[in-house]
Image (spheres, rainbow, N blue to C red):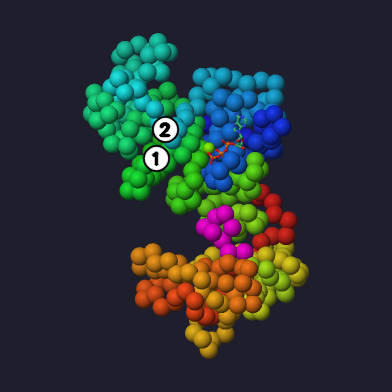
Amino acid sequence: MAGLTIDQVSKRFGEHEALSNVSIDVADGEFLAVLGPSGCGKTTLLRMVAGFEKVSGGRIVIGGQTMSSAEHSLPPEKRKVGIVFQNYALWPHMTVAENVGYSLKVAKVGRAERDRRVTEALSLVNLNGFGDRRPANLSGGQRQRVALARCLVSAPSLVLFDEPLANLDVHLRASMEDEFADFHKRTGTTIVYITHDQAEAMALADRIAVMDKGKLAQLAPPRELYREPANEMVASFISQGIILPADVLTAAESGHCRVRVLGQEVVVRCRPDERPRAGAKLCCRSPELEAVGAHEEGIPVAIKRVVYQGGSARVELSPVERPDLNLHIEQADPVTLEAGVEARVRIKSGWVIPEAGNAS
Ligand SMILES: Nc1ncnc2c1ncn2[C@@H]1O[C@H](COP(=O)(O)OP(=O)(O)OP(=O)(O)O)[C@@H](O)[C@H]1O
Ligand SMILES: [Mg+2]
């Protein structure tokens, strides 16, 4: 096992700066997920950690040893890093055991030792007894587990995943998520896990790094990321946060302050250093908004769309006074709201987005 330090790493492809000054410390045994829009640099970062790509600046340190710097780059095979991609490309003409043991064979590891390690790796991914099968005779999830075993057989100190479940259906994803969580618990391997699926990241990771246009936007545990986004990008990217203009009316006290938002005064969560200011932004999650009766205090809204989702509906609406703002709430069955009508919404809580977002 080994920790990973990504220290002020930058990567340029010609004129294009794919990563700029990214610093992330991954503790020994930690499960770190990386989230971010397409093209923000996630795969590039992983490829540099694995040694497939050189850094333009900064350092990558694994288990205390500098693997990459602008001057030096250790080749991938010297890094003890395992990597599992979305398309797991097993060799169809080899059995499962041969696929898993291939790298050991290339490294001229003896037959007995090889068999032992292959059996051990297959057992780690719950594929005992599958060694003689061909990949064609496995389910998608089993194939992905073979790919994982193939990476584990060389006893990596760090395992990197690049969207390993993206090709699997919803049910398989869920069961593979359980397998990964279980695998992490049993082995304590340090894991860096790229995904597009926020729920997956939240379920699996100790901490999540959100990247935006080649920069680290925030690095925090899932709950903190959701409740206390550091900036507007993270607020709107994670769980489709609703961003509303607000004026902060009081200084922070016990993590709360009073704000005026769309004509309503509400007590919301904030940083301890928050102070009265105009032009702030409030992040609300849909459970923090609720529809209220026509005669109750609330923001008049026009309902634009109601999408039934089984058990509840997603209701998209805009304040009558601010038709340019898009809000959404959930309404549980029985769904009574419908498109075209006016209603009232109350803001119950929210988070004041810090004035100068930082990546703490
Ligand atoms: N070899 C390369 N040469 C030039 N540009 C590249 C190269 N590899 C990646 N890029 C560019 O660097 C940026 C980051 O790419 P990267 O593949 O890391 O994104 P990503 O976050 O993994 O996206 P996705 O979620 O779509 O997989 C993109 O703008 C991409 O076009
Ligand atoms: Mg990618």
Whether 239 is among the magenta residues is: yes
Q: Residues within 10 Å of mark 1 (few under 14, many from 20)?
A: some
Question: Would you say the residues marked 1 and 2 are in contact, meaning their CB atoms lie under 8 Å apart?
Answer: yes
- Mark 2 = which residue? 87
Q: Position of residue 100 (x, y in %)?
A: 35, 23
Q: Residue at x 54, y 76 (%)?
A: 302
In the image: residue 250, left or right of residue 48:
right
Give coordinates of residue 144: x percent, y percent.
36, 34
Question: From the viewer's perspective, is 280 left or right of 156?
Answer: right
Apparent side of residue 15 relative to residue 233 in the rendered image (left or right):
right
Range drawn in magenta: 236-243
Q: Percent position (x, y) of residue 192? A: 51, 38
Q: Quadrant of ligand 1?
A: top right
Could you tell me residue 119's position as x and y percent?
30, 25
- Return the residue nearer the eye: 343 or 285: 343
Q: Nearer the viewer, residue 89 or 259?
A: 89
Task: Give the spatial CA distance, label 1 vs label 2.
Answer: 8 Å
Total number of numbered discs in the rendering: 2
Ligand 1 within 8 Å of disc 1? The answer is no
Kind of residue sitting beneath label 1: Asn
Q: Residue at x 24, y 26 (%)?
A: 133
The vertical placement of 260 against 149, above or below, is below
Which comes before the other along the chain, label 1 or label 2?
2
Q: Looking at the picture, which amino acid does disc 2 mark?
A: Asn
**For mark 1, what is the residue?**
167
